[in-house]
Amino acid sequence: MNKVSIILLGYGNIGKAFVERIEKQKSFFLSNFDLDIEFLLIVRSKTYCKKNQWFDLTNPFRLLQETFLEYPDKKYIIVDCTAAESMIDLYLSIKDVKACIIAANKAPLAVEYTKYLKLQNHFKSNNIAFFHEATVGAGLPIIKPIKSLVQSGDLIHSIQGVFSGTLTYLFSQVNEPFSTRLQSAYDLGYTEPDPRVDLSGLDVARKCLVLARMIGSTLSLSDIIIESLIPDNLESVCVDDFFNEIKSYDVVISKRESLAHSNNQKLCYMGIITKDSIQVGLETVDNLSDFSTLTGTSNLIEVKSGYYPDTYSIKGPGAGIEVTVNGLFSDFLAAILV
């Protein structure tokens, strides 16, 4: 019987759902892969679980190194369900063990380019397989198809899409004031606890940068043109004051939507990617385009390449706990075969 040891980083909603999914499917892995799976460590920001007991955490780097020294012959699958950019330093500390990394965390892939390159070289020199399907489209198969095209010799000319389920929702409910839509999205759990995280465009920019680097770009976040939807005077106020004051922004969005409507168009918050440039912000799309039909929290990505000059599309739900776990689980299936 084969055995794999999971080290889970991050035990919020997605981390907990991932544990539940693996536990539910243990008999599947045993019968189909003769594989026994254990959660060796579950690591939170201040505590960690080992052998069903929780302990205070002082240094995650030291914890991992001590674990690797204690069990040098295990096969490790490290699953990153955090949102911390600092995880890149933890990735760089992993060596001299048989390990794969699965990430839902896009921040380490959106660091400054020279550090990103250092990370890729570290993975290569230490034979660390890295999987990150859940970083861009939650459970949508985006990373694997693009990686396959690049490896097959295809030249990808451009990628454009709606990469935020939250922003799809906000711009598909056009019969209501923008502030009402935002409050509804917040109440439904579609936004971050501070919705300015979604409105800033930074999350979309990071997703776009992940894809751009896959097609050979050397850009960094500082090179991306990002249109923020946060009014300047509401950048620093508390969340309650933000919701109270965002109503004043309704007229700004309404004017832009009315102008688009008069031209048989609609507003979509999009990312437009080439090897040499990335632009993130509100775009007008024709009412007959596939982008104009998006509802709920759907994502739509169009890829134009040498093999697909007329583009091919990937569409589906781009947000949610279960669909994100689908992406992680897909990567887990690949990691156990490495």
Image: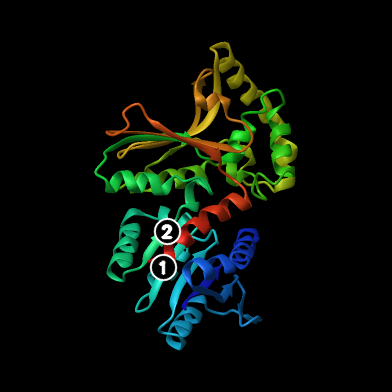
In the image, which disc is placed on residue 100? 1
Left/right placement of residue 290 relative to residue 252 reads left
Residue 135 location (% of width, % of height): 48, 52
Q: Badge 2: how crowded within 10 Å, few (<14), some, or many (20+)?
A: many
Residue 17 location (% of width, % of height): 63, 60
The kind of residue on which mark 1 rests is Cys
- Residue 221 seen in render: no
Left/right placement of residue 179 relative to residue 34 reads right
Q: Tell me the residue that label 2 is attached to.
A: 131
- Residue 204 seen in render: yes
Residue at point 30%, 40% (across, down): 275
Choose between 52 and 163: the one closer to the eye.
52
Q: Quadrant of the C terminus?
A: bottom left
Which residue in the rendered view is the most extreme toward the left?
A: 153
Residue at point 46%, 58% (across, down): 331
Query: From the viewer's perspective, is residue 189 above or below residue 232?
Result: below
SS assignment at label 2: strand
The kind of residue on which mark 2 rests is Phe
Q: Mark 1 or mark 2: name the one nearer the start of the chain.
A: 1
